[in-house]
């Protein structure tokens, strides 16, 4: 799970479970693992949903982040875009002002 905002206010975001299919088995990584490869805004709901791709141990994973607040979604999009290539642990430790 990608943790960027620790408060329970209107800017809370959620990451849907990410997975990779391999030989009839699904692998579900947990925690702030891997390196952020890319971030994209949803075509359907660009102000409230982002898709991220991460690389961990040579495999690529897709995650979905949903937001309750449009402005916060935009801020996180810009932050993630600027930090592609960094580990999710590093990105997760960034403080974001409210």
Image: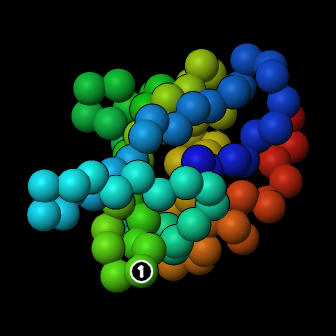
Q: Position of residue 84 (x, y in %)?
A: 51, 71
Figure colour scheme: rainbow
Placement of 67 over or under 56, stated as above or below: above
Residue with the mark numbered 1: 57
Toward which corner of the image does residue 83 lie, by quadrant?
bottom right
Position of residue 73 in the picture relative to residue 17 (left or right):
right
Q: Position of residue 95 (x, y in %)?
A: 85, 54
Could you tell me which quadrant the C terminus lies in? top right
- Residue, x 51% and y 73% (percent of image)? 35
Toward which corner of the image does residue 46 lie, by quadrant?
top left
Toward which corner of the image does residue 43 lie, by quadrant?
top left
Q: Identify the residue at the far front of this view.
A: 24
- Residue, x 72% and y 70% (percent of image)? 90
Q: Position of residue 36 (x, y in %)?
A: 49, 68
Q: Identify the residue at the far bottom of this view.
A: 58
The answer to whether residue 71 of the structure is visible from this angle is no
């Amino acid at each position: 799970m990608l943790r960027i905002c620790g408060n329970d206010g209107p800017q809370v975001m959620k990451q849907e479970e990410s997975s990779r299919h391999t030989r009839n088995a699904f692998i579900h990584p947990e925690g702030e693992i891997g390196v952020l490869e890319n971030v994209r805004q949803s075509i359907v709901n660009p102000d409230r949903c982002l898709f991220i791709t991460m690389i961990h141990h040579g495999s690529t994973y897709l995650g979905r982040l949903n937001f309750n607040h449009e402005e916060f979604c935009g801020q996180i999009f810009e932050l993630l875009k600027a930090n592609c290539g960094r580990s999710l642990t590093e990105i997760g430790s960034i403080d974001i002002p409210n």
